[in-house]
């Protein structure tokens, strides 16, 4: 199995800490979610390398030891999608596979919608296309209640104080409490996320993803007249407490070539909780799309 190597990449005026595995100019870029880090892809990096890709998982802007620009405006999707394009360029990518989970998935959908650089494949895990999410909110009060934290995160300072309390215990508990298979989240795994949250300024940067993107994101939503043309795979853990399974439906107007794999009995943290099933779904889809 290929070794995971940690290094730095300079892109879009920032310094990103990245874990990478494999070699070559077929580059798979893996974007983590909130409140995760690059280590959330520890099971996928070697699997993608075995399929012939150079797999790169960065700590996103504001996370871990990656650069942490000040001000919520610096966490708008305009900048987040620019980071993706710049990271692909810095890696010398000739073929591009973009993979995202949670906030990383929102960035991936937005990148695919905006079309900054062409992609050969797009994979999203437990994150709805923003147009689908909008459609679900219009008809589902249940999803509004699931998404209560988005409104809470708009309050200045209070979310940071709550999550920082008791040594950021709430960050660690978010994984263990949500997971259906808790054995997948041993103390050493969640300790990474807890420790990152305690870095000065980190929690504000992480929450700024929510604060910066409540408006001004129309170009990333789309209107259904220009669906994403990139071959796409949606992997969905069905036992997601934050996003109902209806967020995995209704993609026809927005994604032209979509394969969906729903995983029963798996929580929001799908790639960490069910790595074997996720990696198998990835490999099957990649072979079907000529990406291996």
Image: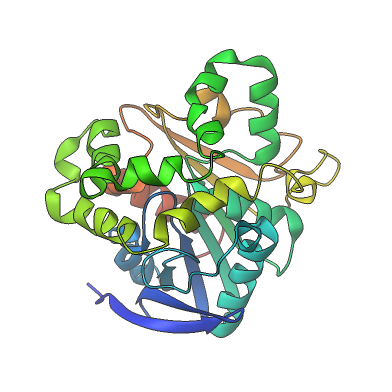
**Residue nearest the viewer, comparing 282 with 86:** 86
Q: Quadrant of residue 237?
A: top left
The residue drawn where x is 67% and y is 45% is 257
**Where is residue 147 shown, x and y percent of the image?**
52, 28
Q: Position of residue 169 (x, y in %)?
A: 23, 43
Residue drawn at x 36%, y 53% as measured from the top left = 36
Relative depth, front residue between 192 and 184 = 192
The quarter in which the N terminus is drawn is: bottom left
Q: Quadrant of residue 96?
A: bottom right
- Residue 175 visible in the displayed image: yes
Residue occupying the point 29% across, 79% down: 5
Indicate left or right for 203 with 98 as reference. Answer: left
The reply to whether residue 244 is in sight is no
Seen in the picture, residue 122 relative to 52 is either above or below; the reply is above
Q: Is residue 90 above or below residue 275?
A: below
Q: Position of residue 220 (x, y in %)?
A: 73, 49
> Up-down: is 4 above or below 239?
below
Q: Is residue 275 left or right of residue 110?
A: left
Residue 133 location, quadrant? top right
Query: 124 left or right of 276?
Result: right
């Amino acid at each position: 199995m290929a070794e995971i190597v940690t290094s730095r990449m300079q892109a879009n005026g920032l310094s990103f800490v990245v874990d990478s595995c494999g070699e070559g100019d077929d580059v798979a870029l893996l974007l983590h979610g909130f409140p995760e880090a690059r280590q959330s892809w520890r099971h996928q990096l070697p699997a993608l390398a075995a399929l012939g890709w150079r797999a790169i998982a960065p700590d996103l802007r504001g996370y871990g030891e990656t650069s942490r620009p000040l001000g919520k405006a610096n966490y708008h999707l305009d900048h987040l999608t620019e980071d993706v394009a710049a990271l692909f360029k810095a890696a010398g990518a000739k073929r591009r596979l973009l993979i995202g989970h949670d906030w990383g998935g929102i960035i991936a959908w937005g990148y695919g919608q905006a079309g900054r650089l062409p992609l050969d494949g797009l994979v999203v895990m437990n994150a709805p296309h923003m147009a689908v999410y909008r459609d679900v909110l219009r008809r589902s009060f249940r999803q509004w209640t699931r998404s209560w934290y988005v409104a809470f995160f708009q309050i200045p300072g209070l979310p940071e104080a709550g999550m920082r309390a008791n040594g950021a215990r709430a960050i660690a508990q978010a994984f263990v409490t949500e997971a259906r298979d808790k054995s997948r989240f041993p103390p050493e795994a969640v300790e990474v996320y807890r420790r990152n949250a305690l870095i000065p300024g980190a929690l504000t940067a992480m929450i700024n993803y929510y604060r910066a993107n409540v408006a001004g994101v129309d170009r990333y939503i789309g209107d259904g007249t220009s669906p994403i043309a990139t071959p796409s795979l949606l992997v969905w853990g069905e036992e997601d407490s934050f996003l109902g399974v209806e967020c995995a439906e209704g993609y026809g107007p927005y994604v032209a070539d979509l394969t969906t794999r729903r995983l029963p009995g798996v929580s929001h943290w799908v790639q960490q909780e069910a790595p074997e099933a996720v990696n198998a779904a990835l490999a099957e889809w990649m072979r079907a799309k000529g990406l291996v």
